[in-house]
Amino acid sequence: MVFKPKGVIPAMVTPIDEKGEVNEVVLRKLVDYLMEGGVHGLFPVGSQGEFYALEKEEKKKIIEIVLDQAKGKIPIYAGTGAITTKETIALTKMAEDIGADAVSIITPFFISPSQDELYDHYLSIAGSTRLPVLLYNNPGRTGVNFSADLVARLSKVDNIVGIKDSSGDITLIAEYIRKTDDDFSVLAGRDTLIYGTLLYGGKGAIAATANVAPKLVSEIYEAYIRGDMNRAKQAQAKLAPLRSAFSLGSFPVVIKEALKLIGIDVGEAKAPISPLSKDKKEILKNILKEINVL
C-alpha cells in the first residue's frame, strides 16, 4: 500500500524547560492535546519545532517521545532536513531506525543549489531510505524554491510521496498539483491557504497553528471532505487571525506564547528569539479568545 500524506498535520513546537533541555512531560502532553483535537499526523522537528537549534541527539529524543506517546495511532513525519546531503541522509537513517513513519525534508539553506542539484540531493536521500519522503518548500526561510517542473520530476521517484509548500504562492501550489499524479500529496504549509489548497486538489496541510487550535484547523479538512464547503470556508476564515498574529514577534515565538496562554507551558523560543512584550501578549490573548481556544 502506498503511503499517502493527508489531513491536518501539526508542525509541532518543541517544549523546552528552564535548563534549555527538551521537556518530555510537556511534549507528551502536547501530543495528547493534538490527538484529542482530531489531527491526522504529527510533524516533530520541523521549522516550528526549531530544528535548526537542536543537536542530533535532541532530535532523536523528540522523535522517540512523540512516537511512544502516539502509539501508532497516527503517522509521525520526522523532520530530517539539513544543509548537506550527507547530514540529511544520516538524520533520515536515524529517523528510520527509531520507527518514524515518514520524513519531511526541507531544501538546503544558506547555500543556493540549482534545480538539478536539488534533484540529485533528493534522489540520493530517497535512495538511502525505505521511508516515504515528503519534500518541503519554504523559500522565505531558505532562499531556495522548488519549481513545478522539479517537483514533477521528483514525484516519479517511488518513495517521494508529496510536498509541503510554505511559499504562500497559490499559483505554484496549483502547478504542483496540475503537474503531478493524484497519488502525490500536495500539502499547504501556509495556514491561510489550507482551504484554497484543498479546492485545487491538495490533500491537506502541515500547520503550525494546529498546535494551538487543532480542532479548528482539522475542521477545515473534515468539512471539506464531507462536502460542506461553507463550513470549511468559515473555519478557514476563523483561523486567519491566529496565522496573521505571527507578525507579533520573530518566528517561531508566537505559537509558543499562544500555547503557554492556553495552559501548555512549552517554555521559551531558543535565543536569540525573545518573548513577546506584555502588550503583544495581550493582543495574542484576545485573538485566542476570538477563535475560542481560550
Image (cartoon, helix red, strand yellow):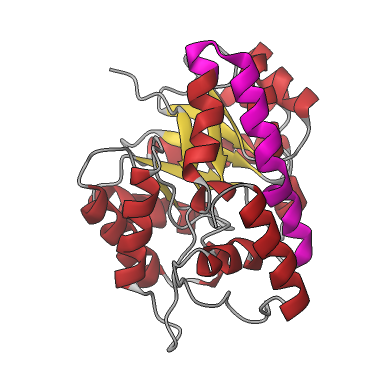
- In the image, residue 116 lies at what x, y percent? 68, 34
Disc count in the image?
A: 0
Which quadrant of the view contains residue 236?
Answer: top right
Q: Nearer the viewer, residue 261 or 148?
A: 261
Query: Is 231 left, or right, of 192 in this rendering?
Result: left
Q: Nearer the viewer, residue 106 or 228?
A: 228
Residue at position x 55%, y 18% from top? 224
Which quadrant of the view contains residue 129?
Answer: top left
Q: Is residue 16 above or below residue 66?
A: below
Residue 277 visible? The answer is no
The quadrant of the image that shows the N terminus is top left
The quadrant of the image that shows the C terminus is bottom right
Q: Is residue 45 above or below residue 237?
A: below
Residue 243 visible? The answer is yes
- Dominant SS in magenta: helix
Q: Nearer the viewer, residue 127 or 250?
A: 250
Residue at position x 57%, y 77% from top? 270
- In the image, residue 284 lies at what x, y percent? 69, 63
User: Per the image, is 246 magenta?
Assistant: yes
Q: Nearer the viewer, residue 229 or 30?
A: 229
Residue at position x 47%, y 40% from top? 215
Residue at position x 74%, y 65% from top? 283
User: Per the image, is 96 magenta?
Assistant: no
Q: Is residue 280 above or below residue 33?
A: below
* Residue that lies at the very extreme toward the bottom in this rendered image: 19
What segment is highlighted magenta in the picture?
A: 224-248
